[in-house]
Image (cartoon, rainbow, N blue to C red):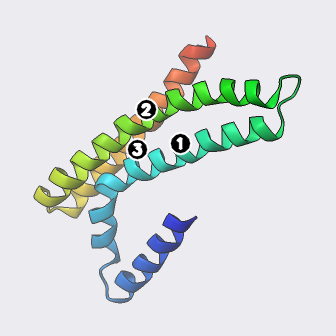
Amino acid sequence: LFNGCMLGALFWVYWAKGLGMELGGWLAIHGTTELFAIALAGAAGMRIGTRIAFPGALTRMTAAAHAGRIAATAMVGVSVMLLFAGLLEGIGRQTITSDVTRYAIGGGMLALWIGYFYLFQVVRNGHR
């Protein structure tokens, strides 16, 4: 929520000066990966909190431990995603000056992460 509010305010200022598309490209190259990672980290935390609040037949500690293992696995993936976002921000955003290329890389990275997580879920659940 905080990131969304800050991003919206920033876009409002830049858009008013005719620089909204440029700001979008500047952020898209790494932002799609970074914001996706932030959303996954939040979902992992919500999973733990939900299991503590609604443990079902398990004790709260046991439910939290089970959810924590799953969340920890997700956080390893989030760490890798943030590494990629850092590389894209530190190198790609500074050396690639074309907005079209920045949008293409950002969109490609978003498609890669969505495809990865979707395919991982399909393979994990045994669906074809």
Which amino acid, mark 2?
Gly
Q: Quadrant of residue 97?
A: bottom left
Mark 3, residues whose alpha carbon is within 10 Å: few (<14), some, or many (≥20)?
A: many
Which dot marks residue 96? Answer: none
Q: Earlier in the sequence, mark 2 or mark 3?
A: 2
Spatial CA span between label 2 and label 3: 14 Å
Single out the mark in the foreground, 3 or 1. 1
Mark 2–mark 1 CB contact (< 8 Å): yes
Badge 3 element: helix
The answer to whether 11 appears left or right of 55 in the picture is left
Mark 1, residues whose alpha carbon is within 10 Å: few (<14), some, or many (≥20)?
A: some
* Location of residue 6 with respect to 64 vertically, above or below: below
**In this orientation, which residue lies closer to the viewer: 3 or 62?**
62
Which amino acid, mark 3?
Leu
The answer to whether 46 appears left or right of 57 in the picture is left
**In this orientation, which residue lies closer to the viewer: 98 or 84?**
84
Q: Quadrant of residue 28?
A: bottom left
Q: Residue at x 45, y 71 (%)?
A: 7
Which amino acid, mark 1?
Leu
* Residue behind mark 1: 40
* Residue behind mark 2: 77
* Residue behind mark 3: 110
Badge 1 element: helix
Badge 2 element: helix
Q: Earlier in the sequence, mark 2 or mark 1?
A: 1
